[in-house]
Image (tube, helix red, strand yellow):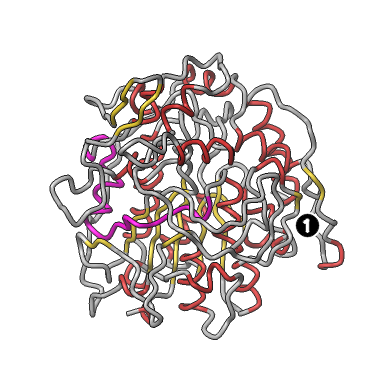
Amino acid sequence: MPDKIQHVVVLMLENRSFDSMLGRLYPDDPDFNGLTLGEYNTYAQTRFGVWSGEGMPPSLATAPDPDPGEFFKDIAEQLQGDPTAPCPMGGFAANYATQKPSSDGPFNPRSAMHFFSPEQVPVITQLAKSFGVCDCWHASAPCQTWPNRFFVHTGTSRGHVDNNTFRIPFPAESLFHRLQKGGRSWRVYFHDMPQSILLGDLWLYAVFHFRGLAQFLADAHTGNLPDYSFIEPRYFSDLFLNKIPNDEHPPHNVLYGEQLIAQVYNAVRSSPCWESTLLIITYDEHGGCYDHVVPPPAVPPDGLVDNPYGYPFNTYGVRVPAVIVSPFVPPGSKVRPPVRDDGLVYPFDHTSIIATVRNLFLKGSPPLTQRDAVAPDLLHALSLPTPSNAGPASIDATAMEASATEVQSRAVIAPNGMQASLSAAAALLPTTPPNTAAQVPAPAGLPNTQYPTVAIAHANATASTNRFLNR
């Protein structure tokens, strides 16, 4: 019933593979492409199998710790591994073990093979079983965070593969801009600094369309959700609010991400908009966490190759979790892409969000790139004739408040790649949004400024963002 969907809400979290979060969702179902527990990697002539653990102590909730490698060259090593090994995707343990030494602790190759059991991540598990799960949703490219987040907004990264190579503002046309031109409503809801604010074609409208998460909760409660909502998590530790990241980026505690998922679901479920809403929960890329499925070939988005590896964007990235929530989705659905009229089947990737929104709200609007032109949308998953799947009335995530010690410990360490890049990019935000397209400055490369701690990077990023948005 696609004509009954009036609101699409997307929550995109950070850096977890499908197997790491949902690999054991249906352990006894041969139709589910999850973990069998026989998967392994080999490093230094030692076999490291996939593993979970008992309970959910902080040592497991933050695994893998330290943060795995996620540059393009890291991902290439993770996917290649030993070509003679019987298990594909054989390089995760070796790449993790050979990371540059860190003061955060040793890089135990076993850590890269960790996954969470359904009991350890009950929120995303309950939603996946109550509605639908996609076990063939891939990151758009085997790249870092920014390329994949730009893919979800624009269908391309314009040839870039690593965060620190981008020029800001990002010049590709975005889905938000297309919605704006089509007279459709949209908003970005965020916690500290939204990565999507780096899209140049949004700067004319930024003040009116970027809001804190509290506004999302209010809009859902009052039935005033826009046609398209995109939600970004908290990326930084916040000493003033006593909050730590809820983006699930390793080694951030996934239970805070679980709380965010529950908060978003509960707001949508209790909203007057519930029966006309499609909620998509996914992750930008795998972040170095093991997955057993080899990424398939992909259609390059635009032919641009602006990276030293000559990578032409002709493959997808590693699988990431994707949960599809709507009262039109039958409970227990395994959402797979349909066979096209030409007999081809493309997996879901982040540009499936673009395809879904275009087909719902922008009928007749051309694709943004060649990638979203072939991307399967999600409308066939809405197969119930009426909005009869009520799902859980609410989800109770474990009530957790970060201790001052926990916040401090995450604030005094060096920023991860996402935090460092966001803070560097914040320096390129104008003091106020431009009034005309002609006032949007030419893209500039990220400055080389290095912020020694997360706290300092956070202060710079939020101050620049708030100044730009007149908050």
- The structure residue drawn at horizontal position 33% and vertical position 20%, both measured from the top left corner, is 46
Query: Foreground residue, 202 or 351?
Result: 351
Q: Is residue 100 placed above or below 120 in the rendered structure?
A: above
- The structure residue drawn at horizontal position 59% and vertical position 68%, both measured from the top left corner, is 175
Residue 401 at x, y = what percent?
40, 29
Residue furthest to the front in view is 84
Residue 112 at x, y = what percent?
40, 29
47 in magenta: no
Q: Is residue 172 placed above or below 425 in the rendered structure?
A: below
Query: Foreground residue, 243 or 75?
Result: 75
The residue singled out by tag 1 in the image is: 433
Query: Foreground residue, 353 or 470?
Result: 353
The quarter in which the N terminus is drawn is bottom left
136 in magenta: yes
- The structure residue drawn at horizontal position 60% and vertical position 65%, both measured from the top left corner, is 301
Please indicate whether residue 443 sits to the left or right of residue 266 in the image.
Answer: right
- Please identify the quarter of the rendering in which residue 117 is found: top left
Residue 5 at x, y = what percent?
39, 75
- Please identify the quarter of the rendering in which residue 72 is found: top right
Residue 367 at x, y = what percent?
58, 75
Which segment did they paint magenta? Answer: 118-141
Residue furthest to the bottom in view is 364
Looking at the rendered structure, the secondary structure element under dot 1 is loop
- Please identify the quarter of the rendering in which residue 458 is found: top right
- The structure residue drawn at horizontal position 49% and vertical position 59%, both measured from the top left corner, is 350
Q: How crowded is mark 1: few (under 14 residues within 10 Å), some or many (20 or more)?
A: some
Please indicate whether residue 284 sits to the left or right of residue 39 in the image.
Answer: right
Query: Foreground residue, 462 or 68?
Result: 68
Looking at numbered disc 1 in the image, what kind of residue is underneath it?
Pro
Q: How many marks?
A: 1
